[in-house]
Image (cartoon, rainbow, N blue to C red):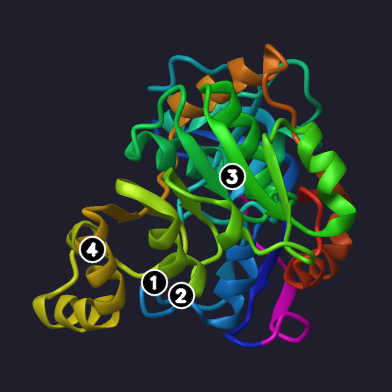
C-alpha cells in the first residue's frame, strides 16, 4: 500500500516521502480500515520538525497522521461492536502506522461509527479536535453558566470548542481576526474579540475556565483573566507536576520542568488556580458521544480545504501557515 512517511527530522518539503509498504496485519482486537479521508493537525508538522522528539523519538521512516475516517474491511476475532462494511472514524494512537496511508489497523476500543449525517471528509475532521476539547473541559469540570475563554476561534480546535462549550451552557469569549468575526459569532460565541482592533485583556475578566490552545505568553495571561480559583487547561503549555507523573518522567527531568514552569506556579498560587496540560488520549466511547452531538446538529464540522492524497505535503504546508478557517482534510478515496 502507499503511505506518506517521515524520512528524518527537518522541514516539511524535503523530509517526507511516499513509500510502498506492507498492508498492516491486524490483531484479534483490531479492525483494518480502508482510509477514505484523514484530518490534518498542527501536531503533524511539529512532529516532522522534531518539536516533540524529547517526548517521543521517532524511528525512521516514521508514519504520520492521527485522524481517520473510512470503512472496516477486516476485523479480529475478538471484535464485537464493529462489522465489515461499517463506516467509522478514529483518532489513532501515536504508535500506529499513521493515517496518511491507504489502510490502517486500529484497536476496536478506539473506533466509533462515524456520524451518519456526515461524509468521510467531514468525519475525519473531528477526532483529534473533538477529543482534545472533550477531555480538556471534563478535566476543568465545565458546567452550565461557566464563563469560558477560547482563543483562535476560527481554527480547527476553536470552531469545535465554541460549539461544544455552548452546548454545555457556557458563556463563550473567543478571539479571531477582523475578517472572521461574523462567521465565528455564527458558531455560537457570545463575545467575539477582534484581536486586530481590541485587546482581549481589557475585555475578558473573572473567567471560570481558559482553554489554552496557543501556549507561550497566552498561558501566563490566562491567570490574569480567570477568577479566584479558576481553571486553565492547556493543550500546548508547560508540563505540570501531574502530567509529568503521567508521562513517567524521572525525578531529574521533573525537576527541570518545575523550573521551567516557575512563572506559572507563582500565578497558580496567586489565584488559587488549577492548571493542567492535557495529554489527549484516543477514546472510542467519547467519539460516540461526539457522533451523537453531530447527528443532533448541535456541532457542525468546519472544513477549510481538502487536498488529494498526492498533495499531502501541500496540505501540511498550508496547515503550518496558521491561516486555516477550520480543518484541513486529505481525501484518499
Of tags 2 and 3, the one toward the viewer is 3
Residue bearing the label numbered 4: 270
The mark that comes first in sequence, 4 or 3, is 3
Of tags 4 and 3, the one toward the viewer is 4
Residue under the image location 38 percent in, 60 percent down:
223
Q: How crowded is mark 3: few (under 14 residues within 10 Å), some or many (20 or more)?
A: many
x, y percent for residue 31:
53, 32
Of tags 1 and 3, the one toward the viewer is 3
Residue under the image location 62 percent in, 50 percent down:
23
Disc 4 to disc 3, C-alpha distance: 31 Å
Determine whether label 1 and label 2 are within 8 Å by CB: yes
Of tags 2 and 4, the one toward the viewer is 4
For residue 56, the mark is 1
The mark that comes first in sequence, 1 or 4, is 1
Q: Is residue 84 visible?
A: no
SS at circle 1: loop
Residue bearing the label numbered 2: 52
Of tags 1 and 4, the one toward the viewer is 4
Residue under the image location 73 percent in, 71 percent down:
320
Determine whether label 2 and label 3 are within 8 Å by CB: no
SS at circle 4: helix
Residue bearing the label numbered 3: 129
Residue 13, image quadrant: bottom right
Q: What stretch is highlighted in magenta?
A: 11-23
Amino acid at each position: 500500500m502507499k503511505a506518506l512517511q517521515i524520512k528524518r527530522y527537518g522541514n516539511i518539503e524535503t523530509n517526507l516521502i511516499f513509500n510502498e509498504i506492507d498492508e498492516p496485519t491486524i490483531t484479534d482486537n483490531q479492525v483494518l480500515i480502508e482510509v477514505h479521508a484523514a484530518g490534518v493537525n498542527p501536531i503533524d508538522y511539529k512532529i516532522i520538525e522534531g518539536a516533540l522528539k524529547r517526548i517521543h523519538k521517532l524511528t525512521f521512516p516514521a508514519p504520520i497522521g492521527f485522524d481517520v475516517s473510512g470503512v472496516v474491511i477486516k476485523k479480529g476475532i475478538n471484535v464485537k461492536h464493529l462489522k465489515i462494511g461499517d463506516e467509522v472514524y478514529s483518532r489513532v494512537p501515536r504508535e500506529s502506522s499513521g493515517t496518511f496511508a491507504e489502510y490502517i489497523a486500529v484497536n476496536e476500543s478506539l473506533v466509533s461509527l462515524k456520524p451518519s449525517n456526515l461524509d468521510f471528509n467531514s468525519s475525519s475532521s473531528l477526532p483529534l479536535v473533538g477529543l482534545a476539547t472533550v477531555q480538556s473541559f471534563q478535566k476543568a469540570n465545565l458546567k452550565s453558566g461557566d464563563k469560558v475563554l477560547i482563543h483562535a476561534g476560527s481554527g480547527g480546535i476553536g470552531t469545535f470548542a465554541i460549539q461544544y462549550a455552548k452546548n454545555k451552557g457556557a458563556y463563550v469569549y473567543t478571539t479571531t481576526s477582523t475578517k472572521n468575526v461574523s462567521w465565528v459569532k455564527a458558531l455560537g460565541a457570545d463575545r467575539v474579540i477582534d484581536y486586530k482592533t481590541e485587546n482581549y485583556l481589557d475585555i475578558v475578566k473573572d473567567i471560570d475556565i481558559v482553554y489554552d490552545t496557543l501556549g507561550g505568553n497566552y498561558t501566563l495571561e490566562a491567570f490574569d483573566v480567570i477568577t479566584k480559583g479558576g481553571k486553565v487547561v492547556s493543550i500546548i503549555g508547560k508540563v505540570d507536576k501531574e502530567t509529568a507523573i503521567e508521562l513517567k518522567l524521572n525525578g531529574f527531568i521533573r525537576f527541570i520542568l518545575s523550573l521551567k514552569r516557575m512563572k506559572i506556579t507563582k500565578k497558580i498560587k496567586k489565584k488559587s488556580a488549577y492548571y493542567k496540560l492535557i495529554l489527549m488520549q484516543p477514546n472510542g466511547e467519547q467519539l460516540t458521544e461526539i457522533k451523537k452531538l453531530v447527528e443532533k446538529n448541535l456541532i457542525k464540522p468546519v472544513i477549510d480545504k481538502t487536498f488529494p492524497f498526492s498533495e499531502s505535503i501541500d496540505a501540511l504546508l498550508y496547515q503550518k501557515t496558521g491561516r486555516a478557517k477550520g480543518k484541513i482534510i486529505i481525501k484518499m478515496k
